Image (spheres, coloured by chain):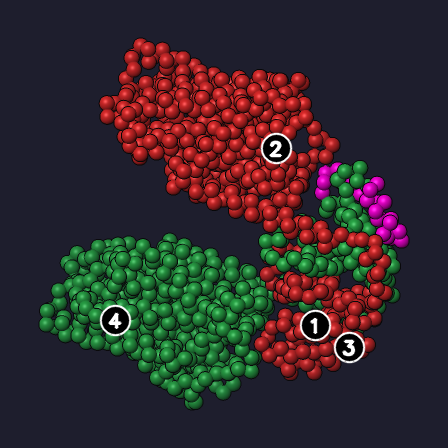
Chain colours: A green, B red
Amino acid sequence: MASLKRLLIGKPMETKRLKHEKLPKWKALAVFSSDALSSVAYATEEILLVLALLGTSVFFYSLPIAVAILVLLLLVTLSYRQIIYAFPSGGGAYVVARDHLGTKISLVAGAALMIDYILTVAVSISSGVAALTSAFPGLLPWKVELAVALVLLLMVLNLRGITESATVFAYPTYVFIGFVLVMIAVGGWQLWQEGWHGFTMHEHASTAHMFASGYSLFILLRAFSSGCSAMTGVEAISNGVPAFRPDSSKNAAITMGWMSTLLGVMFLGITVLAAGFGVTPTEHQTVISQIGRHVFGNGLLFYLFQLATMVILVLAANTSFAGFPQLTSIMAKDGFLPRSLAARGDRLVFSNGIILLSVLAIALIIAFHAKTHSLIPLYAVGVFLSFTIGQSGLIKKLWNREEGRKFGVLLTVGTGAVVTGIVTLVTMIAKFTQGAWIVIVAIPLFVWMFIRIHEHYKKLGEQLRLDEREWQQRGKLLKPKVIIPISGVSKVVAQSVQYARSISDDITALSIIFDEKDEQKLRQKWEKFYPDIPLKVIYSPYRTILSPLLEYITKAEKEADRAPVTVLLPQFIVKKWWHTFLHNQTAIILRFFLIMKKDVVIATLPYHLRE
Amino acid sequence: MASLKRLLIGKPMETKRLKHEKLPKWKALAVFSSDALSSVAYATEEILLVLALLGTSVFFYSLPIAVAILVLLLLVTLSYRQIIYAFPSGGGAYVVARDHLGTKISLVAGAALMIDYILTVAVSISSGVAALTSAFPGLLPWKVELAVALVLLLMVLNLRGITESATVFAYPTYVFIGFVLVMIAVGGWQLWQEGWHGFTMHEHASTAHMFASGYSLFILLRAFSSGCSAMTGVEAISNGVPAFRPDSSKNAAITMGWMSTLLGVMFLGITVLAAGFGVTPTEHQTVISQIGRHVFGNGLLFYLFQLATMVILVLAANTSFAGFPQLTSIMAKDGFLPRSLAARGDRLVFSNGIILLSVLAIALIIAFHAKTHSLIPLYAVGVFLSFTIGQSGLIKKLWNREEGRKFGVLLTVGTGAVVTGIVTLVTMIAKFTQGAWIVIVAIPLFVWMFIRIHEHYKKLGEQLRLDEREWQQRGKLLKPKVIIPISGVSKVVAQSVQYARSISDDITALSIIFDEKDEQKLRQKWEKFYPDIPLKVIYSPYRTILSPLLEYITKAEKEADRAPVTVLLPQFIVKKWWHTFLHNQTAIILRFFLIMKKDVVIATLPYHLRE
């Protein structure tokens, strides 16, 4: 076991090696934007899949929807640039809300973020596998297995402690950006040459027509909120400000601008090409890969493009492996999650958080059959909820600060908060039946769980606090009353008796027999070896050991007054694992129940078998 | 948990209630013959399924094969009547071989019998489910689930402790016998009326033709050995002689005669009807149910017949739930199986044996998709091997007895032994690739396992034996050296220190810190409360607790000379199960490794949390 662990995750690392590298802008862009930029691999397709409910005649509406999302992106970017300046030490929505909006809202943000991170892994990996199966349809039957394997790979790599800042991760992001930009340029030129032969505005799908029907409007809103999945991850830079070279806030704000520009260009370009070429979503091939095949042909370039798409999606999933354990460790330190999530493992990473994230993401992938489209409705709610809370926190901070209020900034952030708030509500309603309800139910459940955990830790702390007054009132020392359960006389019993004598003079041997005839023989043997130690024999007609033992201990506790009762239990230590099955595991079961039910000390004496 | 157990298996029973009812012959026949008689539900079909490899033109050969099996049945019956007289206290092949042929052969018999019992459950239940799905084809997709559910039902009933002798079990056997005899009589009359319209001797499948081809001969032998599955269970009466009313041997021998006669008539009758009506085996309907439908029509009688078939097959499986736990308890008492198999549970039954049988049978059912035909090749080897060994044991006993040898008896039993030995070999060869190889590999593996277990118990006994000389040489008593691992000062630590003081004066507190800065603060607090107890602080750069602790204990053991080292570990006892996840389970992990690796006593102090 131990050696397998070492092989997989490497040698332990000293605490002192914990430090942070400062990143130049070009590298930071790659590191922090893989999540946001990779979204273009599925966002356009998600819009089209929703519009398909009204028929391909309305596919043209993907263009105005994309434009609306670009406006939203602009607002959020402007707003988040202010967050970067206001919280130069970084700070996700949880920390911002905790410090400025109070505990309850911070817990809502924490729940939304946790769900968001889990979904980032599930969605990105599912989409990455879709990129792979679009190139190699023979792999389709193994979609779920491939996705699970990728999550496990990320888990192992992160348990080893890869740092987000590793240079090797920067290149694939640029490769993907390069591919998409070239695809848009070449595709645009082709479209110019061939003429627009895709989706156009149909008569019966005119704007007036669409808005006249409540259902159509509802579907348009749903398509819009599906498209908003393009914006997941744009907050990453604001969380990572301290990783930038100084002047870090300014550099981060500039980088954020670049990232949003790239995201906007790529998303719009892909949506235009899809509409211009008339690409419709299919089960077996993603929209972006259909565009890729159209532009690059069916050769090597196409396969490389699919590979690049898969790699950036895996990197996007990987960002959650940094974010989730970080968040849960902060929340665990605040007492809202089990403390084990705050402990750094061998390799300095928060191992338990990494494992928890992997397990939850794998559960989602299996439950939703690694289908990106089924996971998307769960995704946007958490993302936009945390956008809204983060910006609200900034407004509160800006409003309360003493140097005076800058109304321009307040207006920017306020608009961002209101608009993302509206998008959150729209998403909740438009996608409720598609799966958003799961998140709407899960967030309050998470918050309730955080509160329960916090209460438990608080009460625990009160119970365990040792004050001097109480400590001086301790009674006088009494030797323990020792009970040795025996079933015969052997070396194991001899060892127990020897130990019992070393700690007390009040020793009783206790034997529970199933057949009354056995008592006589046992007594004779016992008295030959240990005449000075009283032997109590109890006949158990139902052949159980536990209940007569518990009964006897209850009596012994009363007689012992305040002296601690100690039960000695031997444990065979076997040389070969399978020998465990050959020994009665009664001692282990007894130990478990005694310690649960009674206030007795259980002393376990190992008896190491020679073979 | 405890209440669920009570609900399922009932209240515990006193040891004194262990007794045996004596059965009249008519009831004993029903109790002991369900296994043998139920075999007719599948034996004919198994012959036809093998012959189908040569085409339906050779199906006529099922008749001479059935006759050959009847001759074999006659030989075995005559031989086993002698076993009944020779071993009036009952005695399966294991006990007979142990007492007369030596340990090694008895272990082979034990392995063969264990496999035989497991397969009886798997085959009978699979065949019972086939009877059900023949009547209700809609249930076909749930074959495996139904079979597993039936095994679990038998498990629960047997854990409650149903006695084999319950009168209620006698009726279904007679109902089945009645149904089959009526079916043979009515079917025979129909055949007489309609004329033989089924399988006949084909020109190209003439005897001479068949025997000229090696392959055909091989298939005929395989069909014969498949048909031998009709004989599984005929030894049951010889194991159960003590359950008969006096004169028990005589009554048992008479009952055995009845049983074999019934079995012979039923098996031959079914085979003749199958041939006469020209029934061919199909996936969805058993041969016997096709005959039933032909004779009884498609009405109520047919459904009742299927029900009766299923019930007797379930009863046949149930006989293994008496035999297997009995056998494994005897072998466990002899030290060849884990001793826990020899312990009677709450309800006086050998619970562990019952559970083990259920688990293994379910594993087989799942592995072979509840297909009787796939399980049959594994079945006959064990059965005929134990027949051979049982009869050989009797020969040895008869040969060695002092009152002189009865050559007539010796000849009968000798013939039986030789013939069943030959059948064992034929089955091994003819069905090797069909699955018999699994059993041929499993038997030596089981025997090897028995021997290893026996060796372990033998060496264990030697190690644990306490002799007086050794016991008097014990050294003088030294107070234990107590180590209290701490991470701070709390009421839990106060409780540990209080206990430590009650058992020794040599106490050290040990703290393992991950950050060197923590030492100063901890020392100050410690010295305020416990100035008289030395505190050892160890800095662990890799944040592990175990290795510095083990290192420290190694050192302490050396310094302690011969005094026992005792480590005090607190254990939180939580009020709600989910609180377990909120506490560091380090103490449990430490306890496990310390006890495995070091010769130290671990005293666990429960700390019962108030909430």
Say what amino acid the circle numbered 4 marks.
Answer: Leu
Kindly identify which residue carries mark 1.
B554
Q: Is residue B603 visible?
A: yes
> Tag 3 or tag 2, which sits nearer the N-term?
2
Task: Determine crowd level at label 2: few under 14, some 14-19, many 20+ residues with C-alpha closer than 10 A.
Answer: many
Do residues under tags 2 and 1 come within 8 Å of each other at their CB atoms? Answer: no
Identify the residue shown where x is 39% and y is 29%: B224
Whole-percent x and y of residue A132? 29, 64
Magenta-tinted stretch = A520-544
Kindly identify which residue carries mark 2.
B96
Alpha carbons under labels 3 and 4: distance apart: 66 Å
Which disc, if any, is residue B534?
3
Q: Secondary structure at mark 3?
A: loop
- In the rendered image, residue B537 lying in the magenta stretch gets the answer no
Q: Chain of mark 4?
A: A
Alpha carbons under labels 2 and 3: distance apart: 67 Å
Farthest-out residue, right: A532
Say what amino acid the circle numbered 1 marks.
Answer: Thr
Q: Secondary structure at mark 1?
A: helix
Task: Determine crowd level at label 3: few under 14, some 14-19, many 20+ residues with C-alpha closer than 10 A.
Answer: some
Do residues under tags 2 and 4 come within 8 Å of each other at their CB atoms? Answer: no
> Tag 1 or tag 2, which sits nearer the N-term?
2
Kindly identify which residue carries mark 4.
A304
Q: Total of numbered circles in the picture?
A: 4
